[in-house]
Image (spheres, helix red, strand yellow):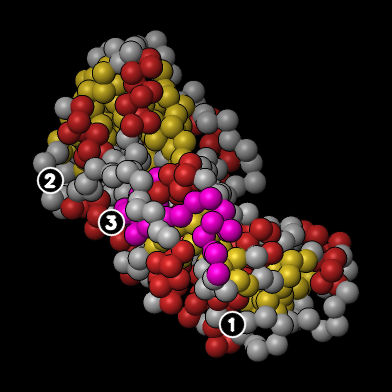
Amino acid sequence: MQVITIETPSLGDRSYIVHDGTVGLVIDPQRDIERLIERAEEVGIAISHVAETHVHNDYVSGGLSLARITGATYLHAADEPLCFDYHAVRDGDTVEIGKMRVEVRHTPGHTPHHLSYVVVAEGEPPAVFTGGSMLYGTVGRTDLISADATDELTHAQYRSVHALADALPDDTLVYPTHGFGSFCASASSDMESDGTLATERRANLALTATDESTFVNELIAGLDAFPKYYAQMGPLNTAGATAVDLSPPAEVDPVELARRIHRGEWVVDMRKRREFASSHIAGTIGIELADGFSTYLGWLLPWGMPVTLLADSRDEIAEAQRQLARIGVDRPTGAAHGGLDAWAHDADRSSYAVATFGDLAGEVDPRIIDTRRNNEYADGHIDGSTHIPLHELLGRLLEVPDEPVHVHCQSGYRASIAASLLDRAGHDVVLIDDDFDNAANAGLTITRAD
């Protein structure tokens, strides 16, 4: 039995191919399935089965498309109200795949019908694919279905993780889908995991909590905001996502670009954040093309709003398009490449200053906006700062003072998006592009929330 891991850093998730050298099972595939097909071809195996651990909330699944293209059997929880044909499986079912036996376990918590898959091959340690149930050091969050269901699902999550741990040996290899930066993960453990169940017994929050009630209270207390676009993922995956179209978007010339900005559409400049701050077309939004690009664009974008992408190169446009397709933003309404001078021509330009926390310490009574999430702010913030999490900024623009404001986050990435939004709204803004750990070193007073 061999396991191939397909990482998607932009969403903090992993997909897997587990195979016996001849046939393989794909678990929790992302929408851009050619990565999986290519890896299967590289090792010379046929994809005979595709399985989902749950109806995903943080990305559009490629499972249905992959099963149709390869002719694979598509495994999904029998109790999910899905709108397409699939092979229904329940707790206790087994599926034979070549030399491997797949045992289905119902592990509710992250979602009500969540499944984990234990894969067994003779003479080898078991492998358990846990989706959003048991993660490395922690568990999947339990508040994505509804606020009313959170308490019940958190209790279920505790019991599911314990049931898995009680049923499997220490040398079991654990392969979660979430937990690598995904907002589907909950609070993390301080201990590193080596991917074995033995380590999880010592590191996992569910397995080290003193009792179920303590675990439930601590987990729920630590839950924070999650991306707004999650609300769209469940319905898309329940209906059955269509195949992705990654053909290049239409090229947009400077005149049409100006029209789109005037109409209030989202025109997103994906250059490095300091380049954007130095000079950009007035009315554009700066979201640097990095691992967080699709997460934060999807979080902030009004669903259905037309998006035009600006980048230095065609390759960057293609990468952004791939990231966005994974969260259901299928077709940008246009794109332009070649750099600022190619897009702008006679367009009005804007800019704003960039500073560090050391520079901020020299200011007299600066107005500071902290754009981090609630739990980060509570752990420590600059005394006197105003807390407006990035995902709330567009709804709280009236709270931003008319005087110059300094904007920061943990590393500068989120603050750069906030700065661009404030600049677009006409505010005088300074981007603090610095690590928050440097704030105290610069002599700024750090306070914890009450």
Does the segment drawn in magenta span residue 186? Answer: no
The mark found on residue 234 in the picture is 3
Residue visible at 13% across and 50% down in the picture: 83
How many angstroms separate mark 3 from mark 1 (CA)?
36 Å
Residue visible at 38% across and 15% down in the picture: 43
Q: Mark 1 = which residue?
A: 426
Q: Mark 2 = which residue?
A: 84
User: Residue 264: horizontal and vertical position, in percent?
Assistant: 42, 76
User: Residue 329: horizontal and vertical position, in percent?
Assistant: 34, 56
Q: Which residues are magenta?
A: 322-346
Where disc 2 sits, the SS reads: loop
Quarter residue 149 falls in: bottom left
Where disc 3 sits, the SS reads: helix
Above or below, 127 against 80 in this view is above
How many angstroms separate mark 2 from mark 1 (CA)?
48 Å
Please report whichever mark, 2 or 3, sits nearer to the chain's N-terminal start.
2
User: Residue 59: horizontal and vertical position, in percent?
Assistant: 36, 50
Where disc 1 sits, the SS reads: loop
Asked if disc 2 and disc 3 are in contact, CB closer than 8 Å, the reply is no
Residue visible at 66% across and 70% down in the picture: 351
